[in-house]
Amino acid sequence: MPRIVKLTDKIQYLQVSYEPLSADVVVVRGDSAWWIFDVGACDMAVDFVNALPRNSVGSAPLEKDSRGSLENSESAAPVAISLKKNIVISHFHRDHLLNVVRHCNGEVLLDFDTLYVGSHASKVVGELGGREKVTVTTPLSFDDGVKIQILPIPNSHAKGSLILVVDDFVFLGDATYPMVGHGSPDVYNVQILEQQIKFLKSLTATRFCLSHKRGLVRDKDSVIQFLESVYARRQKNENYIEA
């Protein structure tokens, strides 16, 4: 039975499940919104997303006095906050986004406001019926009490993949995995793998999170070292490396 695991005071995730195959679902609590990375394919994932509370209590911004200094006043008293729910889909494979498709087909009700998807996932999802869909082709950044980045990533596994960077965590989905062979060997594209290694090295965050892995969190260096070991096996005039 998948369980909910707490990474920090603001980040938790529902573990992967296998019947049906359903990817880890990560939720991040921002000041104004929940940021949800992938929605899985099982009913438990739907319930996990829908149970995230819309209403919370926070503090109103402090006001400046006549000298321009922030003052402690009644303006800092607790106020009711209405939280949005923003979903980021890593890629178009069904174990990561099926519950959005099920929502669109009327099979389940998924509670969210905005969906961020790559170009291929956008085609799979289709129209959302009144909810906002943002197709991400360039990096997006948000300051929501935590630093949020939604980044396209070069990868062999699935075209149009996105990752979610939250402070020191990088949620990679399946982006570091090979292209699935479906009867043939799984492979990495040599050129894309080189681009991916350079891209991952450029990130300042140090905790890499890979879907479908028990424990989820890996050290940045260990992930890059593995990919470099794969890249080192490339052969002249060959476009692919067997995983």
Image: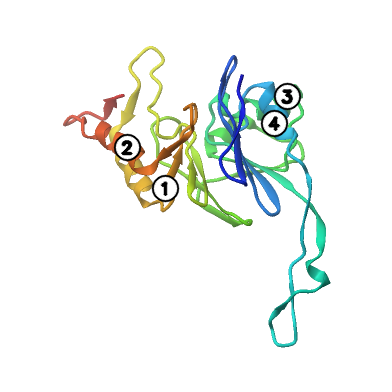
- Crowding at dot 2, Cα within 10 Å, few <14 / some 14-19 / many 20+, comes out as many
Residue 50: image x %, image y %?
74, 33
Q: Which mark is residue 206?
A: 1
Q: Which mark is residue 48?
A: 4
User: Which label's residue is closer to the chain start, 4 or 1?
Assistant: 4
Tell me: residue 243, above or below residue 126.
above
Q: How far apart are labels 2 and 3 at the CA level?
A: 36 Å
**Residue at x 70%, y 87% (from the top left corner):** 67
Marks counted in the figure total 4
**Residue at x 53%, y 36% (from the top left corner):** 90
Tell me the element at label 2. helix
- Amino acid identity at mark 4: Phe
**Residue at x 56%, y 33% (from the top left corner):** 121
The residue identified by callout 2 is 193
User: Which label's residue is closer to the chain start, 1 or 2?
Assistant: 2
Tell me, yes or no, whether the two marked residues, 2 and 3, touch with CB atoms within 8 Å. Answer: no
Point out the frontmost of discs 1 and 2.
1
The residue identified by callout 3 is 105
- Amino acid identity at mark 1: Thr
Residue 65: image x %, image y %?
75, 83
Q: Which mark is residue 175?
A: none
The quarter of the picture where residue 141 lies is bottom right
- Amino acid identity at mark 2: Leu
User: Which label's residue is closer to the chain start, 1 or 3?
Assistant: 3
